[in-house]
């Protein structure tokens, strides 16, 4: 089974036997790959009870919880990596969630859909409507996305907070693309972050 492209990037950059917390882990697809291929000690936090059940059925250690409320309970530096994949834009307080991620993990992976991609812009410009795309398949009224972040917004946020970027990858149609003009041409971004020194 092949991983979703952003998850594959994350999996490729996590070392063997790492301790990992996957926040918003879904059905545990990434955790299972890390356990099976990297012998990682992977734990998960997931809000959807159906996804929790699916992950537990895979033999994974996943608890039901909400990133906005439950990350405060985790001790500092308790994981090598904390992962937040396609969850940032659904958090009520994404800045607080990111602070916790960088507190809990020595490093943090964050991936999100880029709301400044040219197709999104074109949909708003010509159609005057919120876009529906492969990465953003819901209508405006049933989307879980409540914060529409762009790559440039995220970079500015990191710079203002002094958060170190150890790696950044950009995807278009599921394939890696260059960082040049990523804010306009990348559909998805993956960042590897480290706490300020």
Image (cartoon, helix red, strand yellow):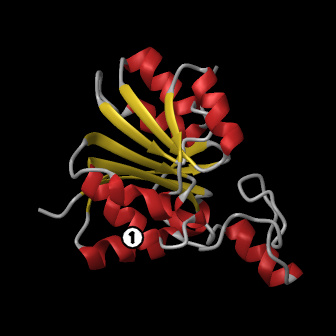
Residue located at (42% from left, 46% from top):
83
Q: Considering the image in quadrants, where does the N terminus appear?
A: top right
Residue 135 drawn at (x, y percent): 71, 54
Instruction: For the C terminus, give its image quadrant.
Output: bottom left
Q: Is residue 180 visible?
A: no
Question: Which residue occupies the extreme right position in the image?
Answer: 127
For the point 57% across and 32% down, the residue is 28
Whole-percent x and y of residue 99? 32, 65
- Residue placed farthest to the left in the image? 197
State the residue in front, 190 or 118.
190
Q: In this orientation, does residue 127 appear? A: yes
Eyeballing the image, is 114 above or below 123?
above
The residue closer to the viewer here, 117 or 158, is 158
| Residue at 78% in and 80% down | 124
Q: Is residue 93 above or below residue 40?
A: below
User: Which residue is at 58% across, 30% downward?
Assistant: 29
Which residue is under mark 1?
Answer: 96
Depth order, front residue of 121/51: 51
Position of 163 compared to 3: left or right?
A: left
Picture coordinates of residue 148 (x, y %)? Answer: 61, 73
Number of marks present in the image shown: 1
10 Å crowding of disc 1: few (<14), some (14-19), many (20+): some
Left or right side of 197 for 32 = right
136 relative to 128, above or below: above
Q: Position of residue 20 (x, y in %)?
A: 36, 36
What secondary structure is marked by label 1?
helix
């Amino acid at each position: 089974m092949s991983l979703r492209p952003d998850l594959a990037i994350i999996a490729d950059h996590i070392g063997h036997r790492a301790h990992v917390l996957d926040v918003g882990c879904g059905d545990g697809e990434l955790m299972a790959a890390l356990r099976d291929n990297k012998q990682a000690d992977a734990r998960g936090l997931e809000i959807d009870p159906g996804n929790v059940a699916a992950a537990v059925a895979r033999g994974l250690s996943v608890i039901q919880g909400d990133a906005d409320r439950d990350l405060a309970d985790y001790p500092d530096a308790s994981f090598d990596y904390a992962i937040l994949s396609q969850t940032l834009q659904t958090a009520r307080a994404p800045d607080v969630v990111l602070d916790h991620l960088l507190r809990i993990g020595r490093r943090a992976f964050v991936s999100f859909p880029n709301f400044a991609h040219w197709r999104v812009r074109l949909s708003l410009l010509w159609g005057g409507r919120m876009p529906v795309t492969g990465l953003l398949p819901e209508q405006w009224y049933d989307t879980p996305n409540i914060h529409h972040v762009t790559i440039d917004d995220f970079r500015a946020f990191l710079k203002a907070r002094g958060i170190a970027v150890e790696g950044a990858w950009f995807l278009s149609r599921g394939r890696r693309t260059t960082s040049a003009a990523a804010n306009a041409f990348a559909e998805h971004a993956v960042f590897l972050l480290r706490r300020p020194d």
